[in-house]
Amino acid sequence: MNRIPVQEVRRSLQIRILRHNPHDPASKPCLQTFELEEAESMTLFIALNEIRQTMDPSLQFDFVCRAGICGSCGMIINGRPGLACRTLTRNLPECITLAPLPGFELIGDLSVNTGKWMRGMSERLETWVHQRDLDRADIDQLEERMEPDLAERIYELERCIECGCCIAACGTARMREDFVGAVGLNQIMRFRLDPRDERSDADFYALVGDESGVFGCMTLLGCEDYCPKDLPLAAQIAFLRRRMVATGA
Amino acid sequence: MEIIYTDVLVIGGGLAGQRAAIGAKRRGHETIVLSLVPAKRSHSAAAQGGMQASLGNCLGASGDNEDIHFADTVRGSDWGADQHVVRMFTHTAPKAIRELAAWGVPWNRVQRGEHEITVDGQKRTIAESDAAHGLITSRNFGGTGKWRACYVSDGTGHAMLYTMSNQAIAAGIPVHERMEALALIHDGGRCCGAIVRNLQSGKLLAYVARATCIATGGYGRIYRVSTNAVINEGMGAAIALETGIASLGNMEAIQFHPTAIVPAGILVTEGCRGDGGLLLDAAGHRFMPDYEPQKMELASRDVVSRRMEEHIAAGHGVQGRFGEHLWLDIRLLGKAHIERNLREVKEICHYFLGIDPVRDLIPVRPAQHYSMGGIRTDHRGQSPQLRGLFAAGESACWDIHGFNRLGGNSVAETVVAGMIVGDSIADFCDSPEGELQVSTALVEEFGQRERQRLAGIGSGNGGESAFELTRLMQDTMTGNVGIFRHGDRLREAVDTLQELQCRAANITLRSSAPGANPELVAAYRLQRMLKLAQCTAYGALQRTESRGAHYRADYPRRNDGEWLRRTLATWPAPEATLPSLDYEALDIMTMELPPGWRGYGDKDHIAHPDTERRKHQISAALAPLGDSADRYTRQQALMPFEHLLPPHLRRRNQRLGDES
Amino acid sequence: MPKTLSALSARMDLLQSLSGLLLVLFIWAHMFFESSILLGEDAMYAVSRMFEGEPLFGKPYPLLVSAAGIAVFLLVAVHAVLALRKFPGSSRQYQLLNRHLGVIRHEDTTLWYVQVITGFCLFFLIPAHLYTVITQPENIGPYASADRVWSERFWIVYALLLLTVHVHAAIGVYRLVMKWYAPTGVQAGRTRARLKRGMWCILAFFILLGTASLLTYMRIGYQHADSAGERYRPASAPVGAR
Ligand SMILES: Cc1cc2nc3c(=O)[nH]c(=O)nc-3n(C[C@H](O)[C@H](O)[C@H](O)COP(=O)(O)OP(=O)(O)OC[C@H]3O[C@@H](n4cnc5c(N)ncnc54)[C@H](O)[C@@H]3O)c2cc1C
Ligand code: HEM
Ligand code: SF4
Ligand code: SF4
Ligand code: FES
């Protein structure tokens, strides 16, 4: 291979990680700094794995798809919630501080139990199509038609990956543990838009028409600003608020 | 040890596992799903491009039906597939997609009127009919005769998995997240559950079940460069293998996807090419038509990947900072199309490459993508060797993919298999066979064995590092068991893997942190992955022909005479370093579509003597029917399959224009 | 049928916003009237007479001002009670919130926090101001007000009030829009940025206007300090003649 070696100055990164292992009674939360030479196209996924493989094998974190698709790797990166797997170190300063997403049960170090929280949210808001006799749907016949544009609008809201960044970014969710957050309100909007779901606004009001639902949201917009999928959360919450006021008041 | 009893234990919370669980639960059986990660984070979510089902709604799909889907799939598999199962699959796929449509997946729909599309590098205008407006639309994919990949923008798997998971939640099926099955409990002939490790606390527990279904996905992570998620380590297949009884089919059949971005190995969907994207070389030349004048960029994946590597080897690759690559060009599709139908692709390019595919070329090179092989099952999804053990999805070798899977056939398989296998699990539980008497002693014995294994890893002081050995295994597989294979290199790989297996017994842990301990996890998974890698390498070494994705440079022709057989691997003893291989012949005399040329790729192959006989038999069977017989009758005359399906899935699929 | 929730939450949320909006409209209008002093003592005199109902009844009734003051006070009270629900309710919540603010870098959250703090200040400042308005409605006029500002040292209250109320109001309006009509579509981000720029412009405008009037009152009050207590007599008798 006739590659001309590029002389490049490699940065040395200081990665500070908020560490704590709740399964170890002796463990106390503390910041630990790791030094690492930056590589070309290095993501936090690569950096953290390198730390685990060469420096501290007990370091805990979650990655699954490492492609920004599955929502496993949300963490606080220099004060901002985001997906670690798709964060390139070259876009960060030399000193990088990583902390687990607040608002979720800590499993260890950077790993938090977003799955449990999200399942609870789904059960509480019943985030599925409600239709009578759904299990007896005729699947031999042509499918029900849907306007192409409507299908796309549903998908727009369906793109949420339940990463939890909006919960971590939300002052309301921090103060009220029962707040369903932007992720929950968005899902309500997704099913509200879906003609296959037979629930009415009154049904939705029963789910989110209080302070743990849409009226708890104080429009802090952390969700909108840090959602890695750029979902139109503020607009959806505003719309839902109007609908719920019209229904409830 | 804590023991949890249930009727059905499903190991794996991806599309296949959850659909099977819903099926079993609906028939009234208590069902628990285990998953390494929250179910919605399973790798099914990463499927982008589409799901194949012959709905035939949009213009590009008109005239499509099960027959064409069947033929495409069998040709794609290079005749390695089980044709009865392919028939069951293609017949059920339209039902699967319609069920998902009713459950809430926002499939993209046909829009009446004129559209601009890109075909063969040219813009063309087509008009969709009023009659099809609002029905599910589909896009073009590699190796298919029709536009058959139904899609939700390029987040198809995500939308499907979320809908599926939500339905599972609605059905009240508990998912025990962050749980890893470490071993199957069995008495030599009957599977009775699994020993499971809690990945938060590190505790072991036992799940005892009347039926156990493995749906743990692929094992791509035995390779260094793979599009797979980091959890795709094949643990389901590995624990089945470790029973010493259940067999794994066609483990050497590994698919390499043409367009993974360089260097991250993240996939950009086949939909890019399906929608009209092109492959270019260093000179900006579109080279695929030179090799494959018929299907060009849209030949099957094995063929395109091979041609790309061939082209790079011929000196036409782009010299990049991370080695050589080629270009994927989707600029010609236009900004509007990319932002609507290929938005994940755009996001991936933006975040991982810092480029905008609307204006820039995407650097790509083939990477490991899919495991055709897996736990061998019969057409009902049950292991032929171990009763009470079922498998579905990518972890299974139900065998619709043979030696090469078509894009979009995998997520379709997961759901279809989930529907069928879920039902046969319920049948099994309802039958006298489903009764389970298991002694706690047996359960304790298996628990004790796993506990000792874990303790053994913890106390080893041979000085080996689990992370280091994993890297060596992955390098060996990517280097020696890749797209182009050769006897010498394969032999080398087998030797290296045997050596690594010995070294893996001497791993020393540096950390003894309480809880999950990620280093311990890496260590015990490595031991199991090495066995899968060995099945792959050793199977590839023995198979002295080229078929589908398995290409032997030293045996470049497909050899139906000797190798129209499925490899079955079992692990003879815990301390063995090689699998024992067995072969299961595919009977041409029962095939609906006897072996021939695929329509792309090499024409040259060594025929089986039965092929001609079967062709004559087929002509003879069809002749009396005359031209007036409909396609169902003709198919029925060649290879009846409906009786293999659960009764409620046997009815015909209605299509646009059919009387209902 | 799912459990039913009361309509109270919806009503309170709406009322909180409506009361805030009314107060903002009031305070902005109030600014224009108050700053009539910039056009001269006569203009301000005319405006204050107008609010005492002179054009309508032929003679001023200061009680009308008291009534208006009480109305505003009630509105403020309603608004404050509703908005205070959003204050951290316990020390634990307060700690959580503080930690959140410490960890997360986020502009809009900071803006909200500024509103909470200014709201808290207003809780004390507004009653102080309204108390004088309600109890001494007749003491509003070019000299009376100026004397209060200067000789009675009310400028300190007013300066603080000016700053807090406008910061609170401008942010409040921006947040009201986002709360009920957040922009959608591809342009959403840009529209929001424009809204925010609009918010800063309005804030700057009212702070400047308010500062200018306050300085004017202070100047008049300073010049008039020797005869503090004396009432203003307009140059020309008929109201609004200039
Ligand atoms: C990037 C990418 C794109 C793809 N795009 C397409 C496409 O467009 N069309 C298409 O048809 N196919 C596509 N595929 C293939 C397809 O996505 C997969 O084959 C399919 O989703 C596999 O589904 P599954 O249910 O079998 O397994 P998965 O979805 O992989 O689920 C496996 C489950 O098993 C669990 N598990 C694993 N091991 C254990 C254990 N030991 N104990 C407990 N639980 C365990 C995991 O937690 C997970 O829940 C794509 C694949 C990739 C990698
Ligand atoms: C005692 C006086 C006041 C207090 C304690 C107070 C407190 C608050 C608080 C805490 C909020 C934030 C509530 C939330 O975000 O949900 C708020 C919002 C608001 N305030 Fe005030 N405020 C006072 C007076 C005023 C005045 C005088 C005005 C008008 C100029 C005003 C206009 C607003 C507006 C428009 C909002 C936004 C409303 C909403 O979010 O629904 N407030 N106030
Ligand atoms: S709404 Fe956005 S930030 Fe919140 S969970 Fe979904 S994807 Fe993540
Ligand atoms: S707008 Fe603010 S309060 Fe409402 S959900 Fe988003 S972050 Fe939370
Ligand atoms: S690992 Fe899946 S989003 Fe980061």
Image (cartoon, rainbow, N blue to C red):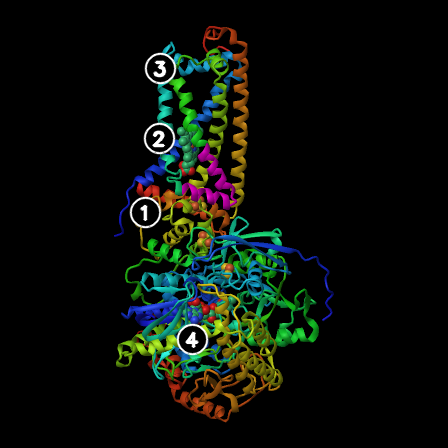
Task: Tell me the residue that label 3 is attached to.
Answer: C63
In contact (CB < 8 Å): disc 1 and disc 2: no
Q: Chain of mark 1?
A: A
Query: What residue is at 45 percent from the left and 90 percent from the top?
Result: B614
Task: Tell me the residue that label 1 is attached to.
Answer: A205
Task: Tell me the residue that label 2 is attached to.
Answer: C78
Amino acid identity at mark 3: Leu
| Mark 1 and mark 2: Cα distance apart in space | 25 Å
Residue C115 x, y percent position in the rendering: 46, 35
| Mark 4 and mark 3: Cα distance apart in space | 90 Å
| Mark 3 and mark 2: Cα distance apart in space | 22 Å
Provide the secondary structure element on which disc 3 rests: helix
Provide the secondary structure element on which disc 2 rests: helix
Circle number at residue B452: 4
Provide the secondary structure element on which disc 4 rests: helix
Number of the front mark, 1 or 2: 2
Amino acid identity at mark 2: Val
Q: Is residue A81 above or below residue B655?
A: above
Who is closer to the viewer here, A247 or C102?
Answer: C102
